[in-house]
Amino acid sequence: MKFYRPTEECGIFGIFGHPEAANLTYLGLYALQHRGQESCGIVSSDGRSLSAHKSMGLVADVFGNQEIFRSLPGPAAIGHVRYSTTGDSVYKNVQPIMVDYSRGSIAVAHNGNLVNAQIIKDELEAWGSIFQTTMDTEIIIHLLATSKQNSLEDRIVDALSRVKGAYCLLFLTETRMVAARDPHGFRPLCLGKLGDSWVVASESCALDLIEAEFIREIEPGEIVVIDKNGLTSLSPLKKVEPAPCIFEFVYFARPDSYIFGQNVYEVRKEFGRQLAREHHVEADIVIPVPDSGVPAALGYAQEAGLPFELGLIRNHYVGRTFIEPQQSIRHFGVKIKLNPVRDILKDKRVVVIDDSIVRGTTSRKIVKMVRNAGAKEVHVRISSPPTSYPCYYGIDTPTRKELISSSHTIEEIRKYITADSLGYLSEEGLLQSVGTGSTPYCKACFSGSYPIKFPKLAAAPQLDLF
């Protein structure tokens, strides 16, 4: 049985002007591994040509041989870790994409999802374009190649003015690195410095690992061009209302990262505090579903005045695949990842904190696991509102019919997961916890209100378009 979590499409990292660019990109990708575990790759530039190494698998496995870095020379590099939301999980879709065309060589790494990808692809194929991958990222390459603009910056602007959706992009040529973020700013992207070198990363935790200084976040709609003369910032794209993804705070970003102007760990703790205010229950202990539920559980325990305990222990050494017995061990998929601490749970009224319920199958197994370990009562608290709609902006979520909260009431979900009580953080509490001010976060997965209209809007909430 699959241990289901929503999964982020990918993470990107780039550095310009450092003699160990490829090695530092490897470390940056290592810090961003939580954003994608299917494949990874690095492209470097020595000022004359681009070199690449990429494969299926985890960063440490793909780049486990030091000799690989000898084949990635130069002072500039970009890298990518991937979880597929658009395109199959196969080698040909491993990023960064690198191509040679009439104006030289270019590599692209992309985090996000383009909602009008199929329409543009159909147009390009009608004019003779041949696609080598099944990713929407390749569309941007074709738009660059067919642009009539002269400069790289203008060709990028021309291409991005055609696409709609979520994108954080890193481009690398022989002499330049360019970063771009979509006008809504769905996904995080930050800028840093390491000595005289410029660094771009999906999250600030990647800057921390290489001891780079966090400078600022790249703004929605901003294009940053970095070359031997330094950094140039452009804002050529049409201004729209920002809509950063609030689920980055709930689950995706690493808790030690700084995104959208806030520390993820502190925001998650505040989710827990607010959850305790909204859904107090008489209990003996509070336990998280590790690891993402830990900060919220700490906040809940502090606000409720209850002991925080690690009642579930996560096995951090589970590989990406394992042989599952047919009938010999029930609930094997959850048991291999989580194990209850019986002495902590026995005869206790337990509050279990998790970040979300998607299909409900995993929550049901966790509740039964805690109850079988001797808990008298099991009260489930979720540090986000019900996830009722799929995401089309770079998160792999099921279709709407597979999301349990799209067709069941909270009481029906409680009965299904066999909890004594169930409480979700309200949408108002969520927004209050992030201290939105004037920032209108994207919360389409909770509300169904999508910031970007779809080419097939009527079908979007029910169907997987891509």
Image (tube, helix red, strand yellow):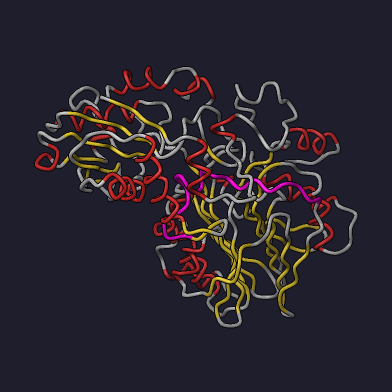
Give the side of residue 187 with respect to residue 102, left or right.
left
Q: Which residue is painted at 66% across and 55% down in the image? A: 169
- Count numbered badges in the picture: 0
Q: Nearer the viewer, residue 1 or 112?
A: 112
Numbered range of the magenta stretch: 238-257
Secondary structure mostly seen in magenta is loop
Task: Determine the image quadrant of residue 139.
Answer: top right
Q: Is residue 324 visible?
A: no
Q: Position of residue 447 (x, y in %)?
A: 58, 30
Give the side of residue 219 with respect to residue 202, left or right.
right
Q: Is residue 95 visible?
A: yes
Q: Which residue is painted at 17% across and 39% down in the image? A: 284
For residue 344, above or below residue 232: above
Task: Determine the image quadrant of residue 84.
Answer: top right
If the image is split into quadrants, where does the C terminus sit?
top right
Query: Does the segment drawn in magenta span residue 255?
Result: yes
If the image is split into quadrants, where does the N terminus sit?
top left
Q: Nearer the viewer, residue 30 or 262?
A: 262
Q: Residue furthest bottom?
A: 195
Q: Nearer the viewer, residue 39 or 447?
A: 447
For residue 130, above or below residue 221: above
Q: Which residue is painted at 50% across and 68% down in the image? A: 207
Give the side of residue 409 with respect to residue 305, left or right.
right
Q: Position of residue 408 (x, y in %)?
A: 44, 18
